[in-house]
Image: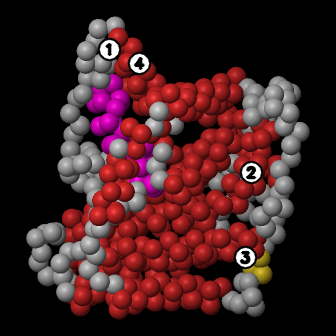
Amino acid sequence: MWLAWGAAFGAQAHGFEERYDLPVPLAYVIAGACACVLLTFIVAVVWMRRPAVSQVKQVLNAQLAHGDSNINSFWRWLVKGISFFLFALTLASALWGTRDPLMNLAPTLIWIGWWVGLSFAVIIVGNFWPRLDPWRTLFELLNAIARRLGLTQGIALNWPWPARIGRWPASVLLLVWCGLEVIYPIAMSPFKLGCLAVAWSFVNLTGMVCFGRAVWQRHADVFAVYFSTLGRRDIHQPEGKNEAPVAGQVGFVLAMLSTVLFDGLHGSATWGLFEGALKAWVPQWLDTNGYVAGTMGLLTVWLIFVSAYRLTCQFCFAFMPSTQTLTSSTQMERLFLPTLIPIAAAYLIAHNFSNLLVQGQTLASLLSDPFGRQWDIFGTAKFYPDIGLVDARLTWTIALVAIVGGHVISIWRAHRLALSLGMSRRKTTIAALPLTLLMIVYTGISLMVLAAPMVNDAP
């Protein structure tokens, strides 16, 4: 991902000036990580018993469901106001600030402060994006004004959402967003980034008006769906009360995994081999900037992830006896899908940890001079980030722990979920084995991709 501010450090956004020398060959590290994931499955088989939802868990879920009612309305709207102000400031700096992406607030605040930083926060504390969402705040404000003016139904038309479309619009938009981040260097132009924000604001508000805010944000608002999925805690409960499974959710969650892995692959030596092979089939004049190759690569990685997961679920279902809970492999895909979310979180942490800590420091100076006009509002305009805060060794250690930890959690949650289907422990073990093998493959591939730009393999 060639982000604009990466040029300030003379390196690619996910690259490193220094590389960490592994004390052992990389193959040994990958083998050990895969063995750890397999060991987790064995421990789960031996020690885990049929789960039961405790009263404590029911109480916690009830508190989370009614958490907003315990927050003073003044403070809630104050938080919304601050968030909306930052949104307006970012948009204004993108459209009317300096065209130098290193001196403009918009690229860094959007890609590092919001997209990466907020994602990390959601992983830790859960999804609080609805309280910050500026588009939701703007819609609620316009809706309240319309009601005050006598429009009792508000501004929402509440058209029915086609069930067959489901969440596919959000899935497609997530792939597009990744393409803009990784393939098309939109961060190099704050003005283009601002135009994109204006266009998305129009589409987002129009969708809320046509279909209603809740329906639109559940199916097509890519950022609302993303943060909701990333912050999901309970694998047993549906996303909303009495709501049926949503079509396209499998594609969305697998896009969360594949887009981060593609970002690492796009900056590796392996990507050059793919581009070289593609040139034999695609005329050079059609892909002078590598956008066609990048798009094809992104879609290919996503399709591989989706196909592998669905094929694995078909194998799992084939080994299962008939149950009242599951009657098809499609149901199994949706049921076990939340167990992949820890892997998506792990990929995100492994891939962006150093960016957040190093490049995130530049927000201190950019907030003092958001338009690049030599201002110093908070007295921090001269602050320069400490690029030695994170080295390659720490980055690799965090990535290794995150990748292994994410897959271990996914294995544990998947086996716990499988036990809740009412099968015997033996049949549960057999049915969960294909999914375990997929997790092991994910572990090996992700470590190979992420290791390429940051470590030197031992001789």
Give the residue type at disc 2.
Gln
- Residue 239 part of the magenta segment: no
Quickly name the residue at label 3: 455
* Residue 415 visible within the image: yes
Name the image quarter holding residue 157.
top left
Front of the two marks 2 and 4: 4
Q: Residue at x 81, y 61 (%)?
A: 389
Q: Is residue 132 above or below residue 156?
A: below
Does any portion of residue 333 appear in the rendered image?
no
Marks 3 and 4 sit apart, C-alpha to C-alpha, by 52 Å
Query: Where residue 388 sits in the image (x, y, percent)?
Result: 84, 62
Residue under label 4? 142
Give the residues drawn in magenta, as a range.
207-231
Q: Which residue, given by chain and number where applicable, does mark 1 sit on? A: 147
Residue ID for mark 2: 359
Q: Quadrant of the N terminus?
A: bottom right
Report the side of 125 relative to 224 (left or right). Answer: right
Q: What's the CA distance linking mark 1 and mark 2?
A: 44 Å
Task: Evaluate if marks 3 and 4 touch, with contact meaning CB atoms under 8 Å apart.
Answer: no
The overriding secondary structure of the stretch rendered in magenta is helix
x and y percentages locating residue 270 in the rendered image: 61, 71
Residue nearest the observer in this picture, 42 or 225: 42
* Residue 119 as seen in the image, left or right of residue 359: left
